[in-house]
Image: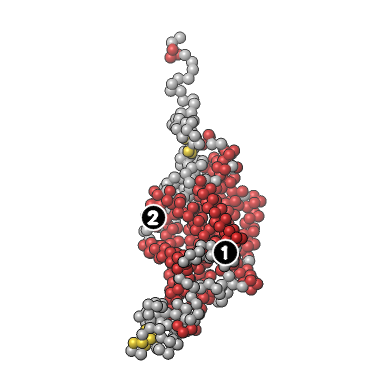
Amino acid sequence: MSGDDTPGPRSDDTSGPRSDDTSGPRSDGPAGPTEEPVPGGSDRPGPATDGGTVAGRGRDGRDGRAGRETFEDVDWSTVGGGRAVLSRRDRGALASVAVVAAAFAYDLLVLPSGTPLVPGPLPWDLSQLDWLFVLSLVLSAWYVVVPLARNRRLTRHYWRQFRKNRLAVASLAYLGVVFAVGTAGPILLAKPELALTKQYQPPLFVGVDPSVPIRCVGPVVEGACRGTLAHPLGTTSDGKDILVLVVYGMNVSIRIGLIVPLIVITVGTTVGTVAAYAGGMVDEVLMRYVDVQQTFPAFFLFLLLTYIFGGSLFLFVLIFGFFGWESIARLVRSEALQRREEQYVRAAVGAGAGTAYVIRRHLVPNVSSTVITATTLLIPSFILFEAALSFLGLGDPTVPSWGQVIAAGRSDLDTAWWISTFPGFFLFFTILAFNFVGDALRDALDPRSEGGGGGGGGA
């Protein structure tokens, strides 16, 4: 018998796994641990969260490629219930949160009351709301800035879609200024205090009758008291500088616009994805609780607690954060129910992936674009609601809110129109800017929306 007739595996035998074997999951189909997900899910170009092959934990080349392993090679017993559920980004975020928590504990338990955490020429004494704001900035950096920075190609794609809306680009620039000024302003500017000798000072380039202010700080030109650079936007009936009040109002708005949505996203996304993936009794219980919570508006709970404890911005953030997520939960559940039936989720479940892994690495990334868009459009409602409560005198009296300043000048519109007008302008343009940005984000992140420019690859 000749050598080539000898039974046994031939050099071109295809019975075993080949290096280019495609029998396993494809990169555009089933799931497996992949690159870090970025906001927007797998409907857009870029590394999909449901890719087929994964980076190997060693260089054993089990499928013929160094450092790579197939879907079947993943040890799901460790992935489903162990450390692999948390990515490096998650562990970095947890470490940062631990640092913030340690600093908060030091400030609360060790430092004497009234002692600033950061001493110096610009002492910084953080309140409970300040700590929530710092925590929100840390989490936003890890889960928004870092993913966009790591996936630059996808970020450029989003930006190309976003900048098609020029009003949204201008609005984003305006909101960037509001964020920067509102964050740094209260650190650099002293809180406005009562100054009766400076009340009703007119804005710069505006003249009023000298009888309106008690004492005209600026020059009197042609029988009219003129404004000065000392108070470029004028002063209130209490002599407080309106420019400083506007800056402090920016600080209130960015806190409301960052902390409350963070709580809403966290709770709503968790409830929605768990209800959709678990189904059955879990889904029924969670959704019925959402129904019950919606029947008792957060506004009435806020009124009740304000009557008991007094108005507080911290109270507003907690109530509207933990009792304003129902719409997000329903939206996420609806989207996650569709994603749960995708082949990559079924493949992961069939291979033994745990519940936490599937939710964290497949469902949440693929509903993130819907969550981001819906939350961006919710932010103006929270800011406007806080301003309305402050206007009615139900807000925090110690915090200079735009609504509070507008209310202070409503009785002086005939003689001191600037008191209510300037804060009203900033409130109006901030709400409008968030709406423009939210519409543009919807078009950029969701390729199914009209005007999205087809910005996404198929899943």
Residue of label 1: 128
In the image, what residue type sits under mark 1?
Gln
Residue 324 visible here: no
Which of 458 and 185 lies nearest the eye of the viewer? Answer: 185
| Label located before the other in sequence (2 or 1) | 1
Disc 2 crowd, CA 10 A, few/some/many (<14, 14-19, 20+): some
Q: Residue at x 64, y 51 (%)?
A: 282
| Residue 189, position as x, y percentages in the image | 45, 70
Q: Residues within 10 Å of mark 1 (few under 14, many from 20)?
A: few
- Identify whether 361 is placed above or below 240: above
Q: Position of residue 122 (x, y in %)?
A: 47, 66
In the current view of this chain or complex, which residue is farthest to the top? 1
Single out the mark in the foreground, 2 or 1: 1
Name the residue tied to disc 2: 159
Q: Which residue type carries mark 2?
A: Trp
The front one of 186 and 435 is 186
Q: Residue 402: x percent and y percent?
A: 49, 73
Name the image quarter holding the N terminus: top left
Secondary-structure class at tag 2: helix
- Residue 35 in view of the camera: yes
Badge 2 vs badge 1, beta-carbon distance below 8 Å: no
Image check: 30 left or right of 305? left
Q: Does dot 1 land on a helix, a strand or a loop?
A: helix
Count the labels in the image.
Answer: 2
Q: Who's the residue at 54% across and 46% down the image?
A: 86
Q: Height in image: 75 above or below 206? A: above
Q: Residue at x 45, y 87 (%)?
A: 214
Up-down relation of residue 154 to residue 381 (above or below): above
